[in-house]
Image: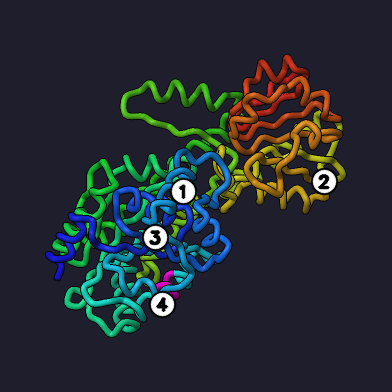
Amino acid sequence: MLSELTTRIQQKTARLAVIGLGYVGLPVASEFARAGFEVLGVDIHKERVAQIQRGESPFAGVEPGLEELVADAVNRGKLRASSDYDGIQDCDVILICVETPVEQDNLPRYGALHSALISLGQVLKPGSLVIVESTIAPGTMAALVQPVLERSSGLQVNRDFYLGICPERVMPGKLLANLRSLSRVVGGMTPATAETMAALYRHIVAADLDAVDCVTAELVKTVENAYRDVQIAFANEIALICEQVGGDVLKVRQLVNKSPGRQMLYAGAGVGGHCIPKDPWLLASSLQGSGASLKLIPAARAVNDLMPLHMVDLIQQALAESSLVVAGSKILVMGYAYLEDTGDTRNSPSQILAARLLQMQAEVIIHDPFVPEYQGDLLTMARDCHAAVLMVKHQLYRSLDLRALRQALSAPILVDGRGFLEADIAEQAGLNYWALGVAKKQP
């Protein structure tokens, strides 16, 4: 059966289904439709389904090519969306792209994945290939995905259906570019399954497709994001040191990276999104109950979680220099998405910052050009604010008239959490400029 499925995949006669039409699933479904496959997208959010059926992308922000790709796929009849699983019974390949969050106890919650597997199992036809694109903890394919699918379908893996994992590697703002150009790790329950998966992804990925076992694929995805989290935490700690000893973290970074083999990342006001704040905990959770303890990964998470609160400290210092306090001050927060030029607010550092400022009895005004509830004219929103704090590197803020901002503010305070603006230009505009990782010069 697997060889027949591989042939159908190569000939693009296999029918595909994608469960979950979020930031991962919709680009995947649209790309396979563009490649010539018939694709059914399934999502529990009915408004999202309706938007896609109209040929619209449901995502705010700059997402090059996606709106046009979705419209073209729908108009050609290659992509349709539904909230009903029944159509999956005719599909040969099913990709699962649902969220796998981590809760306050830092342990994964697979409710969405479990629900999708139960619903899929009830309509899964023999001979199908099921691929999980969601990021999961090492060992989850064997401990959860396989047994749940086997129980709900009454079928047996490697005999009646095939199973693998190909973790996504995309980020908002670059969804299609990442999908097409980044290498992928295709993990199969058997080597033959992995090769069939590679044959599928060759239709949309112009990069290496490394065939491995499922555990290796689970490890690679969680390790790569934990590695980045640790690197960011290092940069953030250097920023804290620079503030105390009189340094400039951007200058230090530039010079450090001249040394061979060094690649220090940027410090910043916090780490957000669906992946990096979560995936290190997914990796760490695989040791639960083993008696082993981790030090570096939890420490990096703690450092990065601290950064929005450190921004509050900088705001306090800046206000104090103007004989002001947080309580009763009006603070403009510039940017609420977690990533520049997108409307993705998942695990937004600005949310933590705003909550802390409100707790300290400040009035908080939030502006974000890509988040509907926070859109508006920035200078109008800045009027009578005592300080502005830049949290996201939206390009709109790069072109901001800083003199006009100064005129709108009731106190000339600008705190930059991303090192995005030029200190000299800000100071020439009459602003009292503070930047993360830069020691404040005494007047």
Query: In the rendered image, which residue does mark 3 sit on?
Result: 134
* Numbered disc in front, either 3 or 2: 3
Query: In the rendered image, which residue does mark 4 sit on?
Result: 119
Q: Which residue is drawn at 49% across and 45% down?
A: 67
The image position of residue 334, as x and y in percent, is 69, 37
Query: In the rendered image, which residue does mark 2 sit on?
Result: 363
The span from disc 4 to disc 2 (Cα, nearest Å) is 46 Å
Q: Is mark 2 on a helix, strand or loop?
A: strand
Instruction: Determine crowd level at label 3: few under 14, some 14-19, many 20+ residues with C-alpha closer than 10 A.
Output: many
The span from disc 1 to disc 3 (Cα, nearest Å) is 25 Å
Nearest the viewer among 289 and 61 is 61
The span from disc 3 to disc 4 (Cα, nearest Å) is 16 Å
Can residue 293 be seen by looking at this rendering? no
Q: Does residue 27 appear to the left or right of 409 in the view shown? A: left
The span from disc 3 to disc 2 (Cα, nearest Å) is 39 Å
Nearer the N terminus, badge 3 or badge 2?
3
Look at label 2 and name its amino acid.
Glu
The span from disc 2 to disc 1 (Cα, nearest Å) is 42 Å
Q: Does residue 239 appear to the left or right of 171 in the view shown? A: right
The image position of residue 248, as x and y in percent, is 57, 24
Q: Give the range drawn in magenta.
A: 113-118
- Label drawn at residue 71: 1
Nearer the N terminus, badge 2 or badge 1?
1
Work out which quarter of the rendered image holds the C terminus and state it. Answer: top right
- Label drawn at residue 51: none
* Numbered disc in front, either 1 or 4: 1
Look at label 3 and name its amino acid.
Ser
The image position of residue 136, as x and y in percent, is 38, 62
